[in-house]
Amino acid sequence: MGENWVVIPICRSERRNLLDPSVLQLNNKLLRDWLVAFLKDEVIRQRGISKVVLGLSGGVDSAVVAYLAAEAFGPKNVYAIRLPYAISSPESLTHAELVVNDTGINCETIEITAMVDGYRLLADPEMSGQRIGNICARCRMTILFDQAMKVGGLPLGTGNKTERLFGYYTWHADDAPPINPLGDLFKSQVWPLARELGVPAPIVDKPPTADLIKGQTDEGDFGLKYEEADSILNLIIRGFTRERLLAMGVLEHSLNLVEKRLDGTHWKRRLPTVAMVSDTAIGEYYLRPVDYR
């Protein structure tokens, strides 16, 4: 199949510009049912676990996972943990509470400032905001895994496909949970799913942010909107060349931004590289039957 071809489900009666955001539209009712079934299968049937834990940030991704989990396991089996740092926005806590009140899931707030600053003040009081953000993310994940052990549950991931392709997360933190229902959804596909699930409008409509610096937004960091980034990413990972994308009308500046993030973060989407010295290397030669699914 040549580079000019792409497999995208569209109505037979229409031909659309492949850069149009509508190309990524999904049947959100079907998607909702599928993700709930996925969670039940992976957590209950495959692992024999009935409880889950997730970090509830007040953003749309974790809110969507909370709603899906409440539907899959029942509210009493879902444990949401709010994990604010000293500079976290109070609005984030308020928005997380909207989710808790609407779904009826369990919720606990664990302040991570002492945990993060205990290390920061000892190691480097002048450390950069990026380093502090990475420490926050890894502290949060440490807590989520411990809370999961406390209740006999499993941590759920909340990262979306755009973040994963852009490497816009902390390695061995946001990507650490063994189950992630949103990992194959672009950010622009998460918002319609959120509306399908009934996530409160203040959460769905606000600009996505890592909530580390006042006024910071994801799209500000990227230099382009999620919808534009997702349209470009969707075609790059389907095999469209740079030349073809430019001929289709993709802005060179936007393409450069997307390619730089995609190419520069490939290592974050792989397990640690192991030197192979046998024919039984785990994950290379040794695979359980379930790994072939």
Image: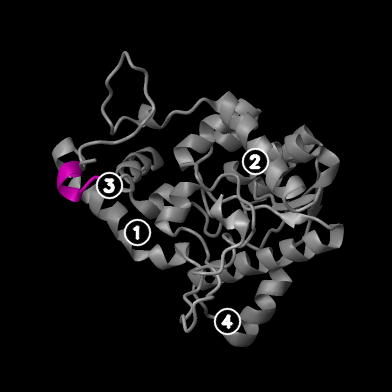
Distance from disc 4 to disc 3, alpha carbons, whole Å, reads 46 Å
Label 3 sits on residue: 239
Distance from disc 3 to disc 2, alpha carbons, whole Å, reads 28 Å
| CB within 8 Å, label 2 to label 4 | no
Q: Where, by quadrant of the figure, is residue 177 drawn?
A: bottom right
Q: Is residue 6 magenta?
A: no
Three-letter amino acid code of the residue under disc 1: Arg
Q: Is residue 75 left or right of residue 177?
A: right
Q: Is residue 80 visible?
A: no
Label 4 sits on residue: 125
Q: Which mark is residue 261?
A: 1
In the image, 255 versus 218, the foreground residue is 255
Q: Position of residue 274 (x, y in %)?
A: 49, 78
Distance from disc 2 to disc 1, alpha carbons, whole Å, reads 30 Å
**Point 31% across, 30% down: residue:** 20
Q: Which residues are magenta?
A: 240-245
Examine the rendered structure and indicate whether residue 103 appears above or below residue 243: above
